[in-house]
Image (tube, rainbow, N blue to C red):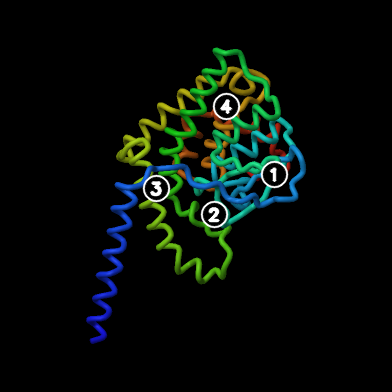
Amino acid sequence: MILEIIAIIIIVLYLLKLIFWIFKTFFTTPSVPSTPKIHKPDFQKDVVYLYQFPRTNTVPNLSSYCLKIETFLRAFKIPHEIIETPSLRSRNGTLPFVELNGEHIPDSDLIETKLREHFHVPNLAPELEAQATAISRLVDNHLLGLIVKYKASEEGWYDALLRGVPGPNFLKTILRPIIKKLFMSKVHARVGLSIGSFTEEETELLCHKDLVAVQNSIRGKFLFGDKITSADCAVFGEVASAYYPFPNKFQRIIDSHYPKIREYCDRIIAELWAEDFTK
């Protein structure tokens, strides 16, 4: 009798799930998720509240997008406050996100665009601005997909990741192989959808192609001369968040073939992160 009741419950739950899927697939229109409530109702005017992952002891943030936005805020001297959070997420379910004058702004690209407009960050000449946009898209999308595979394959990544998770060490040790398996599966699926599935040799080949483009774009002290631009923030966020946290294959690729990129990142650290960035 009990088994029959359990079987009926399972069937009912399955049918409800199927009905929900049919309704969502055929009778609803995809829409943007609703904007969450502001977490800082007592905000100060024109102060950017940056919500991001907790800091680590080797780099300010393991997330390239979080590091990109904080670097941008520092580079253009925009008043801001860092709010570290292990749980809050943006409208799109991601970090970072910012709040500015009571407005919720998700996604690093949208954040940069709105902050540049609000704080009157000057544009480059049209031709250079086009090149800056192209190099930012390259690192934020394609190079990111390659680098995250290198991160996910290293034990040091999980050491750094778990240090930011509250809880006793013995529990982290137990959960570590589960977290690694789930993270690697998620990375494989997302990278496959965004840029494709590649062997280790193919990944390295494409990584070299991207890094050659980055290195050849460094025209002076920074990408476009002696001043840091938003494109520098994107490149630095991606490269530095993978190069500095722990020994890994991406780090070895940079050291072996792209010393100009390493020196470039060191200059940005000296300019903006002298007291916060542990190399």
Q: Earlier in the sequence, mark 1 or mark 2?
A: 2
- Residue 142, horizontal then vertical, whole percent: 42, 33
Q: Earlier in the sequence, mark 4 or mark 3?
A: 3
Circle 3 sits in a helix, a strand or a loop, which is it?
helix
- Residue 227, horizontal then vertical, whole percent: 68, 22
Q: Is residue 268 above or below residue 225?
A: below
Which of the numbered marks, if any, corresponds to residue 276? 1
What quarter of the picture does the N terminus occupy? bottom left
Residue, disc 2 = 160
Q: Residue at x 54, y 12 (%)?
A: 127
Residue 269 horizontal side relative to residue 26, left or right: right
Amino acid residing under circle 3: Val
Q: CA distance from mark 1 to mark 4?
A: 21 Å
Cβ atoms under marks 1 and 2 closer than 8 Å: no
Q: Earlier in the sequence, mark 1 or mark 3?
A: 3
Amino acid residing under circle 1: Asp
Q: CA distance from mark 1 to mark 2?
A: 17 Å
- Residue 173, horizontal then vertical, whole percent: 48, 67
Cβ atoms under marks 4 and 2 closer than 8 Å: no
Q: Residue at x 33, y 57 (%)?
A: 20
Amino acid residing under circle 4: Ala
Mark 2 is surrounded, within 10 Å at the Cα level, by few (under 14), some (14 to 19) or many (20 or more) other residues, namely: some
Q: CA distance from mark 2 to mark 3?
A: 17 Å
Q: Earlier in the sequence, mark 1 or mark 4?
A: 4
Residue, disc 3 = 187
Cβ atoms under marks 4 and 3 closer than 8 Å: no
What quarter of the picture does the C terminus occupy? top right
Cβ atoms under marks 1 and 3 closer than 8 Å: no
Amino acid residing under circle 2: Ala
Q: Of 201 and 18, which appears nearest the observer?
A: 18
Residue, disc 4 = 231
